[in-house]
Image (cartoon, rainbow, N blue to C red):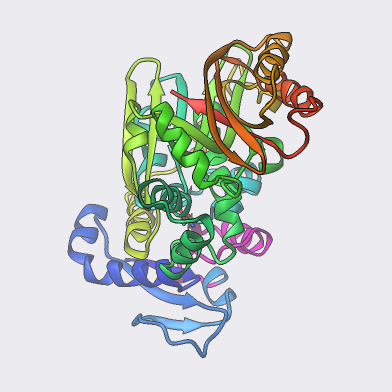
Protein backbone atom coordinates (compact mmCIF):
# COMPACT_ATOMS: atom_id res chain seq x y z
CA UNK A 1 0.00 0.00 0.00
CA UNK A 2 1.14 3.53 -0.82
CA UNK A 3 0.00 6.35 1.44
CA UNK A 4 -0.45 9.85 0.10
CA UNK A 5 -0.44 13.10 2.09
CA UNK A 6 -1.94 16.17 0.44
CA UNK A 7 -0.74 19.66 1.36
CA UNK A 8 -3.49 22.04 0.27
CA UNK A 9 -7.02 20.64 0.19
CA UNK A 10 -8.71 23.23 -2.02
CA UNK A 11 -10.46 22.50 -5.31
CA UNK A 12 -7.67 20.31 -6.71
CA UNK A 13 -6.69 18.65 -3.41
CA UNK A 14 -10.30 17.70 -2.78
CA UNK A 15 -10.54 16.13 -6.24
CA UNK A 16 -7.26 14.24 -5.72
CA UNK A 17 -8.49 12.69 -2.44
CA UNK A 18 -11.91 11.83 -3.86
CA UNK A 19 -10.74 10.43 -7.22
CA UNK A 20 -8.11 8.26 -5.47
CA UNK A 21 -10.97 6.74 -3.47
CA UNK A 22 -13.72 6.69 -6.10
CA UNK A 23 -11.54 5.37 -8.98
CA UNK A 24 -9.46 3.08 -6.77
CA UNK A 25 -10.34 0.04 -8.94
CA UNK A 26 -8.67 1.36 -12.08
CA UNK A 27 -5.94 3.23 -10.20
CA UNK A 28 -4.77 0.22 -8.17
CA UNK A 29 -4.94 -2.03 -11.24
CA UNK A 30 -2.78 0.40 -13.22
CA UNK A 31 -0.39 1.09 -10.37
CA UNK A 32 -0.16 -2.53 -9.22
CA UNK A 33 -0.66 -1.42 -5.63
CA UNK A 34 -3.36 0.19 -3.52
CA UNK A 35 -2.97 3.99 -3.24
CA UNK A 36 -4.59 5.55 -0.21
CA UNK A 37 -5.10 9.27 0.43
CA UNK A 38 -4.38 9.52 4.12
CA UNK A 39 -3.93 13.03 5.52
CA UNK A 40 -4.73 16.48 4.14
CA UNK A 41 -3.07 19.68 5.36
CA UNK A 42 -5.01 22.97 5.32
CA UNK A 43 -4.40 26.51 6.62
CA UNK A 44 -7.92 27.03 7.94
CA UNK A 45 -9.32 24.09 9.90
CA UNK A 46 -12.67 25.86 10.33
CA UNK A 47 -13.46 25.69 6.59
CA UNK A 48 -15.54 22.66 5.62
CA UNK A 49 -13.84 20.23 3.16
CA UNK A 50 -15.70 17.74 1.01
CA UNK A 51 -13.29 14.87 1.72
CA UNK A 52 -13.26 11.80 3.94
CA UNK A 53 -9.58 11.86 4.93
CA UNK A 54 -8.06 13.15 8.13
CA UNK A 55 -7.43 16.91 8.03
CA UNK A 56 -4.74 18.78 9.96
CA UNK A 57 -3.17 22.24 9.88
CA UNK A 58 0.28 20.85 10.67
CA UNK A 59 2.34 20.06 7.52
CA UNK A 60 4.87 18.04 9.54
CA UNK A 61 2.12 15.43 10.05
CA UNK A 62 2.68 14.67 6.34
CA UNK A 63 6.26 15.67 5.66
CA UNK A 64 7.88 14.11 8.70
CA UNK A 65 5.50 11.15 8.90
CA UNK A 66 7.26 7.82 8.23
CA UNK A 67 3.94 6.31 7.09
CA UNK A 68 3.50 8.77 4.22
CA UNK A 69 5.17 7.68 0.95
CA UNK A 70 4.10 10.42 -1.47
CA UNK A 71 3.64 14.11 -0.64
CA UNK A 72 1.32 16.02 -2.96
CA UNK A 73 1.94 19.78 -2.82
CA UNK A 74 -1.05 21.87 -3.93
CA UNK A 75 -0.73 24.91 -1.71
CA UNK A 76 0.49 27.55 -4.20
CA UNK A 77 3.07 30.25 -3.53
CA UNK A 78 6.84 29.93 -3.92
CA UNK A 79 9.04 30.04 -0.82
CA UNK A 80 6.74 28.29 1.67
CA UNK A 81 6.08 25.28 -0.60
CA UNK A 82 9.78 25.25 -1.56
CA UNK A 83 10.77 24.77 2.09
CA UNK A 84 8.16 22.04 2.55
CA UNK A 85 8.97 20.15 -0.67
CA UNK A 86 12.69 20.35 0.15
CA UNK A 87 12.07 18.89 3.59
CA UNK A 88 9.84 16.15 2.17
CA UNK A 89 12.57 15.16 -0.32
CA UNK A 90 15.24 15.27 2.39
CA UNK A 91 13.01 12.91 4.37
CA UNK A 92 13.13 10.50 1.40
CA UNK A 93 9.57 11.08 0.22
CA UNK A 94 8.45 11.22 -3.39
CA UNK A 95 6.73 14.47 -4.31
CA UNK A 96 4.04 15.45 -6.78
CA UNK A 97 3.35 19.15 -7.27
CA UNK A 98 0.99 21.20 -9.42
CA UNK A 99 2.73 24.42 -8.41
CA UNK A 100 3.97 26.24 -11.52
CA UNK A 101 5.24 29.29 -9.61
CA UNK A 102 7.37 27.06 -7.38
CA UNK A 103 8.86 25.38 -10.45
CA UNK A 104 9.31 28.61 -12.40
CA UNK A 105 11.73 29.73 -9.67
CA UNK A 106 13.11 26.54 -8.08
CA UNK A 107 12.92 23.67 -10.59
CA UNK A 108 16.69 23.30 -10.94
CA UNK A 109 17.30 23.52 -7.14
CA UNK A 110 14.59 20.94 -6.60
CA UNK A 111 15.98 18.64 -9.29
CA UNK A 112 19.30 18.66 -7.44
CA UNK A 113 17.69 18.04 -4.06
CA UNK A 114 15.48 15.25 -5.46
CA UNK A 115 18.40 13.32 -7.01
CA UNK A 116 16.97 9.89 -7.75
CA UNK A 117 13.75 10.49 -5.86
CA UNK A 118 10.76 11.18 -8.07
CA UNK A 119 9.50 14.77 -8.17
CA UNK A 120 6.74 14.90 -10.76
CA UNK A 121 4.71 17.90 -11.90
CA UNK A 122 2.39 16.98 -14.78
CA UNK A 123 -0.41 19.16 -13.39
CA UNK A 124 1.74 22.30 -13.23
CA UNK A 125 1.31 23.06 -16.95
CA UNK A 126 -2.06 23.11 -18.70
CA UNK A 127 -3.91 21.24 -15.91
CA UNK A 128 -5.42 18.12 -17.43
CA UNK A 129 -3.34 18.00 -20.64
CA UNK A 130 -0.48 15.48 -20.32
CA UNK A 131 2.03 17.80 -21.96
CA UNK A 132 4.91 17.22 -19.52
CA UNK A 133 4.83 13.47 -20.15
CA UNK A 134 4.53 14.08 -23.88
CA UNK A 135 7.62 16.32 -23.94
CA UNK A 136 9.67 14.34 -21.41
CA UNK A 137 8.88 10.91 -22.82
CA UNK A 138 6.78 10.75 -25.97
CA UNK A 139 8.78 13.33 -27.93
CA UNK A 140 12.19 12.67 -26.38
CA UNK A 141 13.75 11.52 -29.70
CA UNK A 142 13.22 14.97 -31.21
CA UNK A 143 15.04 18.25 -31.27
CA UNK A 144 12.18 20.59 -30.41
CA UNK A 145 11.78 23.33 -33.01
CA UNK A 146 9.02 25.25 -31.27
CA UNK A 147 6.37 25.25 -28.60
CA UNK A 148 3.42 27.58 -29.05
CA UNK A 149 0.79 27.42 -26.34
CA UNK A 150 -2.42 28.87 -25.06
CA UNK A 151 -1.47 28.28 -21.46
CA UNK A 152 -3.89 30.50 -19.57
CA UNK A 153 -7.58 29.70 -19.73
CA UNK A 154 -8.66 32.96 -18.13
CA UNK A 155 -7.03 35.08 -20.83
CA UNK A 156 -8.30 32.83 -23.59
CA UNK A 157 -11.80 33.00 -22.18
CA UNK A 158 -11.60 36.79 -21.97
CA UNK A 159 -10.19 37.28 -25.47
CA UNK A 160 -12.74 34.87 -26.96
CA UNK A 161 -15.60 36.82 -25.37
CA UNK A 162 -14.13 40.12 -26.56
CA UNK A 163 -13.73 38.79 -30.10
CA UNK A 164 -16.98 36.86 -30.45
CA UNK A 165 -19.36 39.00 -28.40
CA UNK A 166 -17.67 42.41 -28.24
CA UNK A 167 -17.73 42.32 -24.41
CA UNK A 168 -15.45 44.93 -22.80
CA UNK A 169 -12.21 43.92 -21.06
CA UNK A 170 -13.41 44.96 -17.57
CA UNK A 171 -16.76 43.20 -17.86
CA UNK A 172 -15.24 39.95 -19.08
CA UNK A 173 -12.54 39.95 -16.38
CA UNK A 174 -15.25 40.24 -13.73
CA UNK A 175 -17.11 37.34 -15.37
CA UNK A 176 -13.94 35.17 -15.44
CA UNK A 177 -13.41 35.82 -11.74
CA UNK A 178 -17.01 34.96 -10.91
CA UNK A 179 -16.71 31.71 -12.88
CA UNK A 180 -13.61 30.81 -10.83
CA UNK A 181 -11.20 30.65 -13.79
CA UNK A 182 -8.87 33.42 -12.64
CA UNK A 183 -6.11 33.02 -10.05
CA UNK A 184 -6.74 34.54 -6.59
CA UNK A 185 -4.83 37.57 -7.87
CA UNK A 186 -5.99 37.91 -11.51
CA UNK A 187 -2.94 40.00 -12.44
CA UNK A 188 -1.11 36.65 -12.57
CA UNK A 189 -3.45 35.67 -15.40
CA UNK A 190 -3.97 38.90 -17.33
CA UNK A 191 -0.36 40.03 -16.83
CA UNK A 192 0.95 36.87 -18.52
CA UNK A 193 2.85 35.58 -15.45
CA UNK A 194 0.86 32.37 -15.03
CA UNK A 195 1.48 31.48 -18.69
CA UNK A 196 5.17 32.44 -18.31
CA UNK A 197 5.63 30.11 -15.34
CA UNK A 198 4.20 27.26 -17.38
CA UNK A 199 6.22 28.10 -20.48
CA UNK A 200 9.48 28.17 -18.51
CA UNK A 201 8.79 24.64 -17.30
CA UNK A 202 8.16 23.43 -20.87
CA UNK A 203 11.27 25.25 -22.13
CA UNK A 204 13.40 23.44 -19.56
CA UNK A 205 12.30 20.08 -20.86
CA UNK A 206 12.55 21.11 -24.52
CA UNK A 207 15.83 23.04 -24.37
CA UNK A 208 17.37 22.59 -20.92
CA UNK A 209 17.12 26.33 -20.31
CA UNK A 210 17.37 27.53 -16.72
CA UNK A 211 15.58 30.88 -16.92
CA UNK A 212 13.39 32.70 -14.44
CA UNK A 213 10.33 34.85 -15.19
CA UNK A 214 12.47 38.00 -14.86
CA UNK A 215 14.71 36.80 -17.70
CA UNK A 216 12.06 36.61 -20.40
CA UNK A 217 9.66 38.89 -22.23
CA UNK A 218 6.25 38.85 -20.54
CA UNK A 219 3.38 41.04 -21.67
CA UNK A 220 -0.24 40.60 -20.62
CA UNK A 221 -3.56 41.32 -22.25
CA UNK A 222 -4.39 44.44 -20.19
CA UNK A 223 -3.95 46.80 -23.11
CA UNK A 224 -5.99 44.86 -25.67
CA UNK A 225 -8.95 46.95 -26.73
CA UNK A 226 -12.12 46.09 -28.60
CA UNK A 227 -10.73 48.04 -31.57
CA UNK A 228 -7.61 45.80 -31.67
CA UNK A 229 -9.95 42.85 -31.72
CA UNK A 230 -12.04 44.13 -34.61
CA UNK A 231 -8.99 45.25 -36.64
CA UNK A 232 -7.38 41.86 -36.07
CA UNK A 233 -10.47 40.27 -37.61
CA UNK A 234 -10.14 42.53 -40.67
CA UNK A 235 -6.56 41.34 -41.19
CA UNK A 236 -7.67 37.69 -40.83
CA UNK A 237 -6.25 37.10 -37.34
CA UNK A 238 -7.46 36.04 -33.92
CA UNK A 239 -5.89 37.55 -30.78
CA UNK A 240 -4.49 35.01 -28.31
CA UNK A 241 -2.20 35.23 -25.30
CA UNK A 242 0.60 32.91 -26.40
CA UNK A 243 3.60 31.34 -24.79
CA UNK A 244 6.27 30.87 -27.45
CA UNK A 245 9.54 28.95 -27.02
CA UNK A 246 11.35 28.67 -30.30
CA UNK A 247 14.79 27.63 -31.44
CA UNK A 248 16.61 29.90 -33.84
CA UNK A 249 20.16 29.74 -35.17
CA UNK A 250 21.29 32.08 -32.39
CA UNK A 251 19.50 30.61 -29.38
CA UNK A 252 16.05 30.09 -27.92
CA UNK A 253 13.31 32.72 -27.73
CA UNK A 254 11.07 32.36 -24.69
CA UNK A 255 8.26 34.87 -24.59
CA UNK A 256 4.68 35.43 -23.49
CA UNK A 257 2.53 38.08 -25.09
CA UNK A 258 -0.77 38.66 -26.82
CA UNK A 259 -0.38 37.89 -30.50
CA UNK A 260 -2.29 38.09 -33.72
CA UNK A 261 -2.58 34.48 -34.79
CA UNK A 262 -3.38 33.56 -38.36
CA UNK A 263 -6.81 31.95 -38.58
CA UNK A 264 -5.10 29.14 -40.51
CA UNK A 265 -3.16 28.07 -37.41
CA UNK A 266 -4.91 25.31 -35.43
CA UNK A 267 -4.24 27.24 -32.21
CA UNK A 268 -6.37 30.15 -33.47
CA UNK A 269 -9.40 27.88 -33.27
CA UNK A 270 -9.01 27.19 -29.56
CA UNK A 271 -11.70 29.18 -27.82
CA UNK A 272 -12.94 29.80 -24.32
CA UNK A 273 -11.23 28.51 -21.21
CA UNK A 274 -9.46 25.62 -23.00
CA UNK A 275 -5.68 25.33 -23.32
CA UNK A 276 -3.74 24.05 -26.32
CA UNK A 277 -0.11 23.50 -27.13
CA UNK A 278 1.54 22.96 -30.48
CA UNK A 279 4.93 21.25 -30.29
CA UNK A 280 7.03 20.89 -33.42
CA UNK A 281 9.74 18.24 -33.28
CA UNK A 282 12.39 17.87 -35.98
CA UNK A 283 11.35 14.27 -36.66
CA UNK A 284 7.71 14.03 -35.66
CA UNK A 285 6.58 17.32 -37.20
CA UNK A 286 3.75 19.24 -35.54
CA UNK A 287 1.82 17.70 -32.67
CA UNK A 288 -1.15 19.40 -30.98
CA UNK A 289 -2.40 18.95 -27.44
CA UNK A 290 -5.79 20.29 -26.39
CA UNK A 291 -7.81 20.15 -23.21
CA UNK A 292 -8.81 21.72 -19.92
CA UNK A 293 -6.06 23.80 -18.36
CA UNK A 294 -7.71 24.15 -14.98
CA UNK A 295 -10.47 22.74 -12.80
CA UNK A 296 -10.42 20.34 -9.86
CA UNK A 297 -10.97 16.97 -11.53
CA UNK A 298 -9.00 17.80 -14.69
CA UNK A 299 -5.95 18.94 -12.72
CA UNK A 300 -6.30 16.05 -10.26
CA UNK A 301 -6.28 13.69 -13.25
CA UNK A 302 -2.69 14.79 -13.93
CA UNK A 303 -1.68 14.74 -10.26
CA UNK A 304 -2.90 11.15 -9.94
CA UNK A 305 -1.17 10.10 -13.17
CA UNK A 306 2.08 11.17 -11.48
CA UNK A 307 1.21 9.27 -8.32
CA UNK A 308 0.59 6.13 -10.43
CA UNK A 309 3.92 6.59 -12.23
CA UNK A 310 5.69 6.78 -8.89
CA UNK A 311 3.83 3.72 -7.62
CA UNK A 312 4.96 1.85 -10.74
CA UNK A 313 8.54 2.65 -9.83
CA UNK A 314 9.20 5.26 -12.50
CA UNK A 315 11.84 7.81 -11.56
CA UNK A 316 13.23 11.03 -13.04
CA UNK A 317 15.11 12.66 -14.47
CA UNK A 318 12.84 15.40 -13.29
CA UNK A 319 13.46 17.80 -16.18
CA UNK A 320 14.11 15.09 -18.73
CA UNK A 321 17.93 15.05 -18.98
CA UNK A 322 20.14 12.33 -17.47
CA UNK A 323 23.19 14.46 -18.25
CA UNK A 324 23.84 17.99 -19.48
CA UNK A 325 23.30 18.83 -23.13
CA UNK A 326 26.68 18.93 -24.87
CA UNK A 327 25.78 21.91 -27.02
CA UNK A 328 23.50 23.68 -24.57
CA UNK A 329 21.07 26.34 -25.75
CA UNK A 330 21.32 30.01 -24.85
CA UNK A 331 18.31 32.13 -24.00
CA UNK A 332 18.06 34.91 -26.58
CA UNK A 333 17.82 38.49 -25.34
CA UNK A 334 14.32 39.91 -25.92
CA UNK A 335 15.81 42.49 -28.31
CA UNK A 336 16.93 39.61 -30.58
CA UNK A 337 13.44 38.13 -30.98
CA UNK A 338 12.39 38.07 -34.62
CA UNK A 339 8.72 38.50 -35.49
CA UNK A 340 6.18 40.09 -37.78
CA UNK A 341 4.41 43.02 -36.12
CA UNK A 342 1.09 44.84 -36.20
CA UNK A 343 1.06 48.55 -35.39
CA UNK A 344 -1.99 50.66 -34.64
CA UNK A 345 -1.02 54.32 -34.90
CA UNK A 346 -3.41 57.17 -34.12
CA UNK A 347 -2.26 60.02 -36.36
CA UNK A 348 -3.35 63.58 -37.06
CA UNK A 349 -5.14 63.64 -40.41
CA UNK A 350 -2.68 65.87 -42.30
CA UNK A 351 -0.91 65.71 -45.68
CA UNK A 352 2.32 63.71 -45.64
CA UNK A 353 1.60 61.76 -42.44
CA UNK A 354 1.42 58.35 -44.11
CA UNK A 355 4.67 59.11 -45.96
CA UNK A 356 6.38 60.16 -42.70
CA UNK A 357 5.27 56.97 -40.95
CA UNK A 358 6.31 54.64 -43.76
CA UNK A 359 9.65 56.36 -44.27
CA UNK A 360 10.37 56.11 -40.52
CA UNK A 361 9.82 52.37 -40.77
CA UNK A 362 11.91 52.16 -43.95
CA UNK A 363 14.74 54.07 -42.22
CA UNK A 364 14.64 51.45 -39.47
CA UNK A 365 15.03 48.68 -42.06
CA UNK A 366 11.45 47.50 -41.53
CA UNK A 367 9.50 46.28 -44.52
CA UNK A 368 5.74 46.89 -44.49
CA UNK A 369 3.42 44.06 -45.48
CA UNK A 370 0.03 45.82 -45.45
CA UNK A 371 -1.50 49.20 -44.55
CA UNK A 372 -5.09 50.17 -43.77
CA UNK A 373 -6.44 53.58 -42.77
CA UNK A 374 -9.61 53.91 -40.74
CA UNK A 375 -11.07 57.38 -41.19
CA UNK A 376 -13.58 57.37 -38.33
CA UNK A 377 -12.00 60.05 -36.15
CA UNK A 378 -11.30 59.47 -32.47
CA UNK A 379 -9.92 62.52 -30.61
CA UNK A 380 -9.43 64.20 -33.99
CA UNK A 381 -7.14 61.39 -35.15
CA UNK A 382 -7.46 58.66 -37.74
CA UNK A 383 -6.06 55.19 -37.24
CA UNK A 384 -3.32 53.70 -39.37
CA UNK A 385 -3.05 49.94 -39.18
CA UNK A 386 0.15 48.36 -40.43
CA UNK A 387 1.60 44.90 -40.54
CA UNK A 388 5.30 44.31 -41.14
CA UNK A 389 7.46 41.55 -42.54
CA UNK A 390 9.91 39.86 -40.15
CA UNK A 391 12.22 42.17 -38.22
CA UNK A 392 13.94 42.22 -34.87
CA UNK A 393 12.28 43.37 -31.66
CA UNK A 394 15.07 45.94 -31.27
CA UNK A 395 14.23 47.34 -34.73
CA UNK A 396 10.50 47.69 -34.10
CA UNK A 397 11.09 49.24 -30.67
CA UNK A 398 13.53 51.77 -32.13
CA UNK A 399 11.06 52.58 -34.92
CA UNK A 400 8.25 53.07 -32.39
CA UNK A 401 10.43 55.57 -30.51
CA UNK A 402 11.11 57.42 -33.78
CA UNK A 403 7.40 57.42 -34.66
CA UNK A 404 6.55 58.92 -31.28
CA UNK A 405 8.84 61.83 -32.04
CA UNK A 406 6.82 62.69 -35.18
CA UNK A 407 4.56 65.68 -34.54
CA UNK A 408 1.65 63.91 -36.23
CA UNK A 409 1.96 60.88 -33.91
CA UNK A 410 3.32 61.81 -30.46
CA UNK A 411 3.25 59.86 -27.17
CA UNK A 412 0.53 57.36 -26.27
CA UNK A 413 -0.78 56.85 -29.79
CA UNK A 414 0.92 53.62 -30.86
CA UNK A 415 0.09 50.07 -29.94
CA UNK A 416 2.06 47.09 -31.16
CA UNK A 417 1.22 43.41 -31.28
CA UNK A 418 3.36 40.54 -32.50
CA UNK A 419 2.06 38.26 -35.26
CA UNK A 420 2.37 34.47 -35.12
CA UNK A 421 1.56 32.58 -38.31
N1 LIG B 1 -5.66 30.67 -13.73
C1 LIG B 1 -5.17 29.59 -14.53
C2 LIG B 1 -5.80 29.72 -15.92
C3 LIG B 1 -5.54 28.28 -13.88
O1 LIG B 1 -6.66 30.59 -16.10
O2 LIG B 1 -5.43 29.01 -16.81
C4 LIG B 1 -4.59 27.16 -14.12
O3 LIG B 1 -3.25 27.45 -13.97
Q: Is residue 128 above or below residue 367?
A: below
Q: Is residue 115 above or below residue 139?
A: below
* Residue at x 79%, y 25% (from the top left corner): 406
Q: Nearer the viewer, residue 84 or 271?
A: 271
Q: Is residue 221 above or below residue 2?
A: above
Residue at the bottom extreme of this rendering: 46
79 drawn magenta: yes
Left or right of 394 in this view: 276: left
Quarter in which the C terminus is drawn: top left
Using the rendered image of the protein, determine whether residue 140 is visible from the camera's viewpoint.
no
* Residue at x 46%, y 60% (from the top left corner): 172
* Residue at x 54%, y 41% (from the top left corner): 201
Left or right of 343 in this view: 119: left
Magenta region, residue range:
65-94
Quarter in which the N terminus is drawn: bottom left
Q: Nearer the viewer, residue 9 or 185?
A: 185
Q: Nearer the viewer, residue 353 or 162?
A: 353
215 drawn magenta: no
Using the rendered image of the protein, determine whether residue 315 is visible from the camera's viewpoint.
yes
Residue 318 location, x and y as percent? 50, 41
Q: Residue 112 occupies which quadrant of the picture? A: top right
Residue at the front extreme of this rendering: 351
The count of marks equals 0
Left or right of 187 in this view: 320: left
Residue 85 location, x and y as percent? 59, 59
Residue 44 location, x and y as percent? 55, 84
Left or right of 309 in this view: 374: right
Residue 185 location, x and y as percent? 59, 64
Amino acid sequence: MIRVGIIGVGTVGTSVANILQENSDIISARAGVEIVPTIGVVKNLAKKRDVSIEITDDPSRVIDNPDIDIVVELMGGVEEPYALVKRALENGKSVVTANKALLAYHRYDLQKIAGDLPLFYEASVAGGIPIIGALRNGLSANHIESIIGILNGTCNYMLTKMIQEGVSYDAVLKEAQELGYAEADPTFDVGGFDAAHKLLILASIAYGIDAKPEDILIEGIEKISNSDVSFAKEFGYEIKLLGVARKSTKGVEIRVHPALVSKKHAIAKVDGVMNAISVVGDRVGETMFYGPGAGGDATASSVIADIIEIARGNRGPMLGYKKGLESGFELLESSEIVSKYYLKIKVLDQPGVLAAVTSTLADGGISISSVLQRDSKVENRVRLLLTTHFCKESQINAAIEQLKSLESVGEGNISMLRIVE
